[in-house]
Each structure stands twice: as structure tokens, then as C-alpha cells.
Amino acid sequence: MKSTILKTASSYLLPILLLFSIFILLRGHYLPGGGFVGGLIASIAFVLHSFTHDTEATLQLLRIHPRALIPVGLGVSALSMFVPFLGGLPVMTGLWFDEPVPVIGLIGSALVFDLGVYLVVIGVVLTVLFTISQYSE
Amino acid sequence: MLIAVLSGLLFSLLYIPFGKYLKGRLAVVAALLPIGLFAYFCSFIPAVSAGNAQVFQYPWIPSMGVNLDFRLDGLSLLFSLLITGIGSLIFLYASAYLKGHPYLGRFYAYLCLFMAAMLGVVLSDNVLLLFVFWELTSISSFFLIGFNNDDAASRKNSLMALAVTGGGGFLLMGGLVLMGHLSGTYSIREMFASNEFLKAHALYPLILALVFMGAFTKSAQFPFHFWLPGAMKAPTPVSAYLHSATMVKAGIYLLARLYPVLGGTDWWTYPLIVVGGITMLYSAFHSIFRTDLKGILAYSTISALGILVFLIGIGTTQALLAAAVFILVHALYKASLFLTTGVIDHETGTRDVTKLSGLRLVLMPLAVAGLLAGLSSAGLPYTFGFIGKDLIYEATLNTGGAMPVILTSLAVITNILLLYAGLLAGLKPFTGSLPSSFADIHLPHWLMWTPPVLLALLGIAFGAFPALADTALLNPAAAAMINESIDSPLKIWHGFNLVLLLSGTTLVLGAVLYLMRKPSAASVTWMARFDHISPKHIMGRTVQYAAKSAAVYTKTLHNGYLRVYLLCIILFAIGLLAFRLFTGGPVQWTINELGPVTSYELIVAGILIGAMYLTVTTPSRLAAIAAIGVIGYCICLLFVFYSAPDLAMTQFTIDTLTVVLFVLVLFKLPPFLNFANRSVRIRDGVVATCFGAIISLIAIQVLNEPTDKTVSQYYGDNAYLLAKGKNVVNVILVDFRGMDTMFEIVVLSIAAIGVYSLLKLRLRASDKD
């Protein structure tokens, strides 16, 4: 797909879409959104970039292979599950900071869990798509 | 107590990374764990023999009734001491037997795992906990039988043992869950209270059948006995430990443990007497047709297990006491014989009893061990075997009705044959003249010959001074089986009576048989002619048929065409849904409660239909995919109309990615080739229409079902109160049902790894070409 307009646009769209995906991730607890949708949007941002440029170029832009995000995301989610356990509470008890943080709002273990989901989704989608696209090339 | 049970598991984990440092003499260190545990359990003897069962409770999953409840009574103590005591000797013996073996660390890891699991089985008071440990013993036995994993026969036999014991374990689980469900508790101790209720329940025979299957497979009862001779492929210390002294007695333990809950009825007695009787006679008879020492010992072990099942079936106080005594008798002499055999095999390189003779000249201490153990198995006076045999005869004689004659004669014949087998294994290799080929054999390291000698001497010590064990260990063990205290010290001398006469007859006939009959290869081949009707071969053939039918099934349904898979799945779903829909009552057609149709809904529906038409008719792949994308977006819009923004967002992004994925895959394919002919298209159309119709019917039907809103009400009310979130959907995902989400992302990860590794594998294979 050698469209100069799309190519130029996607370079600008990538950061905007990523920012949007993080916005979706953060608002999830109060308004439609969340880690799963956020992760999908972030993946679409990268997929769009890889379409207009090249899979290799996107991989270079990412610096780390997306498959590395899978264990990281799983780890983050698992951590948020087991932290309450260390404090003597049942696994997956929701823990919250008392004071809301400016812009983001209240931060709690659910948000950390969602962050893990976000990372896993990006890792899974990009791993599958990039592997297939590299295979078919 | 928790530490004592779980230390084996911990050590087995430690041996995996650090086992390779366990070389040479240092391997002896491994025995410190069982020795320590043995001392620990010995410290409970005074309390337990005074009738105070020790209870240890640790909460684990209280909400499901599964707790780490351990209970140490007489029966558990007897088994615990056997497990750790014989275990100590086996650990020491193995350090010399497998000296220099590259996987010694792994061996100890399996052995520790087994020891922990077996202790768990005999100490658990919770049936579910018992079951977990029960399965662990099967698994560790699987690893140990297949320890020489470069030997195909080892692998095959370990798999067979796992299949038989695992299958039985599965049935046992059913029985235990039924028991727990009916009695309302999973604690064995608390089940005692509801034993009358359980015995009167309609499901009682089913519970018994399931529990018996578990016990029979584990304890190698006819017709499931065949895995045990196969298990002799394991290194000899393992055969001595798992497949003679401890693990195979887990089934016996289970029957003994559940006797106060389930036992004492006709349903209990007759199956056990019949199966135990057949097993003990059948395999005692088999054992005399073997020439391989381990084969002889394996069959005589099965026979001994049959005797134990038989005794528990009789179920009188005397019979249960006899069972408790015989467990100890058998463990001592059989482990000793196995270890002796191990040394013979290790030194001479053969276990063929026809070739072995005169080894007393070169392996003197072992000859003593073999002789004493053989005599104990023969039941000569002043050996422990004598007391055991007397008790068995007393138990069979004191049953009511016409039974005593039949049961006693069964027991006598079995004992004569067992006596012959015991002498063959313990005496035959050491007597006679020494062949010149064995002349330069010398005694192995002392760690290899002291354990069998010690075990054989213990058999004599208990026989000569039964007071050493009776009130301290054996009476409490039998008391635990009948759930009331027993005080009957064991006696060597009962006076001149029928029991003594039978005992004498057994001895004389057995000795005559030993002197008259010489083991030969001819008898083995004679026996082999009946192999094709043996349970082992019937089982083998069944497995073959199963494999064949699986192959046929795979060929028809898993032929590699995605379209066939889809067709199968959808057809099956249609069948299932239609069956439920049309048999579940009249289908409701009322649609007047639906809201009015708006103009924008109509527009979306129009686009939807147009896109569908395009998908089906277009001659271009890419156009079809784009049309499918349009269908997906239309559905997103419908979600938006009906106020499900989260769903719409997700569907929207997923659809986008799906289209991208399709394009990636199909972009490289040649432009449309019309694969599908007319009839295939009509078939697919009919299937698709049926599926759509069924789903629509269900959707209409659902509207007429009364809906239960308590769950959604709860989530809606509590999302902000409990989880500080205003978006209920997201709160459910990350908080209320967070565990589900966790598993979902794990599944996603597995899928990604699958795609990645499959495609990378293909790349590498093509690189090679």
C-alpha cells in the first residue's frame, strides 16, 4: 500500500491513537473503555503503521518484540492479584489509594490489573498479526 | 505434622536443580529425611498406642470443605512407620545400588515425592485430600517404573501402570465425592457418624463399587493385577519400596480405613472375599511358574495383597487383626527378599532362578537375610510369618455358616504355594553348588547388604518376641479399623489345636513341593500358552481397538479442512439447540412486547442485508472481506442503539483487526478461483439459514422467559460501593470476575504462542529445504 497521504498520516496517527488508547484504558473504571479495548486500539495504531510502512519498520519502532509484552502484562496482572494476599487479604481484594491523583483519578489495584490486560492484548494481537504478515511475505 | 508430610515434596523440588551434586558417598545424605521422619513418627507411638489419635488441622480451602486435616491413629501410624522406616533403608540401599547413575538426583526426587504422597494418603482425614495424595502416588510410581526411560518396555509398563491405577483413581474420586455429598462432610472421622445412613442409602452399592475399583486397581487385584509384574521394570529398590511394601498397600489401607464407614454388610463382604480369594489363589499359582526372581516376588506380592483384601472382606475383629499383622509381616519379609534379589541381580547380572545357586559361599550375609525372610514367608515357628499365618487361619475358621471350610482351604492352598515361592526366592539362589562363573563375585558395599539383613532380622525379632509390636502398634491399627479398642496380645503358642495342625500341614506340603519341584524354563513356556486369555492381553486388545477406532474417527472428522470443521461444529450446534428448543416446551411467538422500529434501525438493517448479499455474490475475495467488515460495523451500531457502548467499542476494534488479519492472509493468494460448485454453495446456504433461524427463534424465545435480575442488580448496586467504579461492565471484568479475565488473558497468550511457534516452525522447516 503505497499511498503517500496514508503513509504521512499514519506517522501522525500513531502517537495520537496511542494516547487515545491510554485515555480509554484510564477512563474504563467510570466510563466505557478499559484495558481490553484500549489494548486493541493501541494494536490498531501499530497495525496501521505497519501497513503503510513495513512490518520490519514497525518492529524497529517498537524496539522490543511485541511477544515480550505478553509475559510482562501477565506478570503485572498477576502481581495486582497477589499483592493483597501478601497483606493477609484474600487474593484479588481491591486496594485503593485514598487520595485521587490529578488527571488520572483514583488509583487502585484494579487499574494495575487493567494495565496488565492492556499490555497482554497489545502483545497477543501484534505477535499474531506480525507473525502472519512476516510469514506471508 | 504439615512440615513432616510436605517436606518430601519440598525435597523433591530441591533435588531437581541440586541433585547433580549428590554424587558418590554423598548420596547417603538423602536418607536423612526418611530417617528423621521415622524418628518423628516413632515419637507418637506411646500416645497413639494409649488410644489417643493425634489430630492436626490446617485450613486450606475452607469454603469447599477441603482442609489439610491429618489424623494419626493406629492404622496411620503403622503405615507411616512402614513408609518412613523401609523408606530409610531403601534410600540408603539405593545410594549404593545406583552409585554413579547420572540421574541419581532425579531418582531421589521421585522417591521423596512418593514418600510425601504416601504419607499424605495414610494421614489425611479429608477424603479429597486423600485423593490428591493418592493420585500423586500413582504419578510418582509412573516416573519410577519408567526411570530407565531409554528402555521401551519400561516406558510401556509405566504407562500401563498409570493407566490402570489412574483409571481406578478416577472411579475412586466418584465414590469419595458421593460419600462426602451424602454424608455432608468430607472428613472420614465425621463420616463414622453417618455410617448407618450411608449403608441404607440407595446409592450404597454404587459407592462401594467405585471405592472398590479404586482399591483393586491400586492394590493389583484380579483382574487388574497385571500392571504390577510389569512394574518390576523399575529399579529393584523401587520394586521393594513401592510395589511391595507400601504403595500397593494403599488400596488395602483405603479399605481398612473405610471399613468403619462402609464395611460389615453383604455388599462389602462378598465382593472382597471373592476378588481377594481369586487374586490370592490365581497369583500364588502363577508365582510358581516363574523363573525370574522379581517375577516370582511380584506374583507372590499380588497374592499377599489378595489375602489382605480377603481378610478385610471377612471383617471380623480377628480377621482385621490378622490383616494388620500380615501387613507388617509381608512388608518385612518381602522387602528383604526384594533387596536380596537386587544384590544378586547387581552382582551376577541375572535373576533367573534356574541359573542361580550356591551364592551363600560368596554372599554370606545375604544368604542369612534370604533364609530368614524365606522362613518368615514360609511361616516357621518363631518367625513373624508364623504368627501372621496362624491369625489368618484363625480368622477363616471363625466365620459363620459353611464358609469356614471353603475359606480355610483357600487360605491353606495359597499359603502352601506362597511358601514355595518364598523359599524359591530366599533359599534357592544360595543353596547347592556354586557355578564357576560366579566364583569371583564378592560382597557389595555394606549399605547394600545391611538393609535386607536388618529387615529379615526384624521379622525374626517380632516373631520371637511378639510383645515388641503387638500392643504398641498392631492392636491400635486393628482398633482403628473397627473403631473400638482391642487388647489381644499376640501369642506364639496356642496349644495343640486345628490352627496348629493346618500350620503344620502348610509347612510340610510346602516343603515337599519345594523339594520335589524344580523351577524350569519349560513351565514358563507352558504357562505362556494361556497368555492370550489373560486379563493383560484382553486389556491390551481393548486398547488397540480403542486406538484403531480413534484413528478412524480422526480421519473422518479431523481431515484438516477448516470448512469441514466449521460445518461439523455448526451442524452439531443446530442439532443440540433445536433439540433443546423443541423438546423444552412450546415455542413462544409473542413479539408484541418489542419496542417500535425506528428509521435508523431500518437503515442499518438495509445496509446489513446489502453487505450480506455482496459477501455471498462477489467474485473478489477482498470485496467479500470488506463486506464482512461492514456487517460487523452494522452490528456495532446496533449495540450502540441498545446502549452497550463497551460492547460496541470492543466489537468495532475487533472487526477492524479481523479484516486486517484476513487481508494479510488472503492478500498473497491468487485472485478468485471458484472452488465451490453449485451444490456445495446450496448446502452451505441451507446450513447457514438453519443456524440463523435457530438463533433467531431462541432470541424471541428468550424474551418470553422470566428473567432473573438478581445478579445484574447486585453488580449494578455494588459496583461503586465495593469497587469504586461507575462502569459496571469494567468493574465486572477487572474486579468482580477478575479471575475469569486473568484466565482469559492467559488463554489469549497461549493462542499467540501457538500461532507464533507454528508459523516459525514452518519457516525453519522450509529453510532446511
Image (tube, coloured by chain):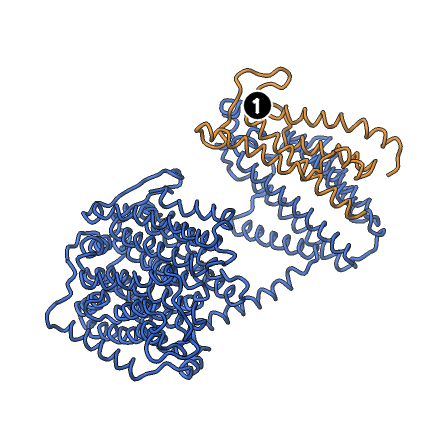
Chain colours: A orange, B blue
**Residue at point 51%, 65% (across, down):** B156
Residue B708 position, x and y percent, is 49, 35
Of B486 and B289, the residue lying toward us = B289
Q: Quadrant of the C terminus of chain B?
A: bottom right
Which corner quadrant of the image does residue B260 belong to?
Answer: bottom left
Secondary structure type for disc 1: loop
Q: Quadrant of the N terminus of chain B?
A: top left
Of A24 and B346, the residue lying toward us = B346
Q: Residue furthest front?
A: B440
Which corner quadrant of the image does residue B487 belong to?
Answer: bottom left
* Horizontal side, residue B577 vs residue B432: left or right: right
Q: Amino acid at mark 1?
A: Lys
Q: Which residue is mark 1?
A: B726
Of B688 and B223, the residue lying toward us = B223
Residue B533 position, x and y percent, is 44, 77
Above or below residue B627? Residue B598 is above
* Horizontal side, residue A103 vs residue B441: left or right: right
Is residue B623 visible from the viewing direction of this image?
Answer: yes
**Residue at point 77%, 29% (across, down):** A14
Which corner quadrant of the image does residue A43 belong to?
Answer: top right
Residue B143 position, x and y percent, is 48, 57
Q: Residues within 10 Å of mark 1 (few under 14, many from 20)?
A: some
**Residue at point 54%, 26% (across, down):** A109
* Horizontal side, residue B31 vs residue A29: left or right: left
* Horizontal side, residue B169 vs residue B600: left or right: left
Above or below residue A102? Residue A51 is below
Above or below residue B604? Residue B360 is below
Q: Residue furthest left?
A: B495
